Image: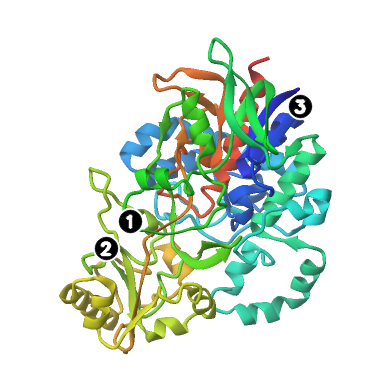
Amino acid sequence: MFDVVVIGTGSAACSAALRAAKGGLKVVAIEKSGLLGGTSAMSGAGVWIPANHIAAAEGISDSKKDAIDYLRAVQTSEWVEKEDVRHQSFVENAPEMLKFLSDNTPLNFKLIDEPDPYVEAPGGKKYGRMLSPMPLSRRIVGRYASKMRRSTLPHIFTYQENVKLNLYHHPILAGLKMWPKLLWRWLTNSGGQGTALMTGLIKGCLDAGVTFRLETRAVRLVQDESGRVTGVEVESGGKKEIIPASRGVVIASGGFEWDKEMRERHFPGPFDRIGTPSTNEGDGQKLAAAAGAHLDNMDQANVYVCLPTRYEGKRYGLPVNFLYEPHSIVVNRHGKRFISEAHFNIGEAIDVRNPDGSPVQLPCYLVGDHRFMQTSLPFRWYASYEPDWVKKADTLDELAAKLGLPAAELKQSVARWNELCAKGHDDDFHRGEAAWERKKDGGQVRLMPIDKAPYIGMSVNRSIIGTKGGARTNEFGQVLREDGSIITGLYAAGLAMANPIGTRAVGAGTTLGPNLTWGYIAAGTMLRQNR
């Protein structure tokens, strides 16, 4: 008999499990795969937490009011109206959540030298909200060390080192500079980024008495006559059983991007790659809907740019932003530029929809000349996983034909770009001018022409590293029906909820920061209620 069943073992799930267990409840976290950590374990583990205690200890000024002002300033008015209450709940609880993790897990968070991407907006900060954990050895989780999900990202480096050493452009130099530490981490089975985050969370959960059950899939939420959720029916080893949950069930099972029908229904149009575990098939969304929940924000996701790679024998995406490299631009299906290639939320621009839900810009392409290919050895390595992805041509007319673009418009866009490069200023979309773009571009505005054949082009359509739609919740993490009433005993967090921060991210860690916080919020509500 358990008090709480948590569906999933990612950041939101483990945050909920840990807080519930530390509050004295008996908790089981179920995982349908054979590996712990979910999408969070594969991530770079950037965590956006405003007004946090680590920044305060360094004398950095921030406040919850500044954070709310920032969220309101950078979202659309419609989104603010819809999500403001939940934004306030996140901001109120996020600093407390981070302190709770620091006190109850081996996680050692450090600040990252990155500004808010909209730092010019009211409440924006140049430093202090972005954090990531230092390396941890998987060995600290004992028999689960071999069950920690690995990543397509090089987790032998920390997020901080990745940023500082410019791993994408200088991987060999980074390795030479870091080799003693890298050797030690290899010998001790240690990792940074998502590996460190999930190792620390799972260690904290184990120490608090949380039970983990792998290869156990939730197939139905059990409800009593009143509609209250009282447990979960699971399937494991070909057998079904019911796990009672006297205090509640938390759905934190991730997104639905690997369910082809769901993905195509909510994200119609051209699609490139997925960068999350293939177990993200929308189980939590389907379970919630069957229990009467209102599904919302189903057209929202982490839309990113992914390089091709392989993972667990499947075609996968490696989330790396290569769109602001010199000698290249991004154009839409009309052959026209539509945004600064260095814009933090270029994924949102790629994904913009018509009123009927159809894509406005897609398909999209990166177009450049052969010098683009010389900027990064990792790019050439990963591009080799899909040899037909990068198209080459001796003329722009030939390239347009290979990409299916109107030649006249493409040539006009390239000519305009070259004109802007000669001026040294992007009058059209101001590439490299915002503080975030300057930071990511090494403090330089790298406007380089596209004028040396051979020319290259490749698709840069939607790639998804987590959908963000699911069960609608209130500010306490409780799942709601269509009429706004609460489904007693049911909570949702992370990418399985209707996430209050959607496709328009407000910082590099505004998936994991809120996910951890919503797991913490849901468990806190359980501890206060349903006694």
Q: Is residue 11 above or below residue 42?
A: above
Spot the residue most to the left.
408
Give the position of the C terminus as an image quadrant. Answer: top right
**Counting residues from the N terminus, which is met first, the one under dot 1 or under dot 2?**
2
**Counting residues from the N terminus, which is met first, the one under dot 2 or under dot 3?**
3
Q: Which mark is residue 394?
A: none
Real-space CA distance between mark 2 and mark 3, rounded to the nearest whole angstrom: 52 Å
Image coords of residue 233 (percent x, y): 63, 27
For image coordinates 71% across by 45% down, the residue present is 201
Between 494 and 315, the one lying in front of the other is: 315
**Residue mark closest to the camera, 2 vs 3:** 3
Name which residue type carries label 2. Answer: Phe
For image coordinates 64% across by 68% down, the residue present is 161
Q: Which mark is residue 338?
A: 2
Give the number of callouts: 3
Query: Taking the image as drawn, is residue 110 in sight?
Result: no
Between 492 and 501, the one lying in front of the other is: 492
Image coords of residue 267 (percent x, y): 36, 48
User: Would you call the spot at circle 1 few (<14 residues within 10 Å), some (14-19), or many (20 or more)?
Assistant: some
Dot 1 corresponds to which residue?
A: 349
Dot 3 corresponds to which residue?
A: 26
Q: Secondary structure at mark 2?
A: loop
Spot the residue most to the front.
238
For image coordinates 53% across by 81% down, the residue present is 377
**Residue mark closest to the camera, 3 vs 1:** 3
User: Left or right of 418: which side holds 55?
Assistant: right
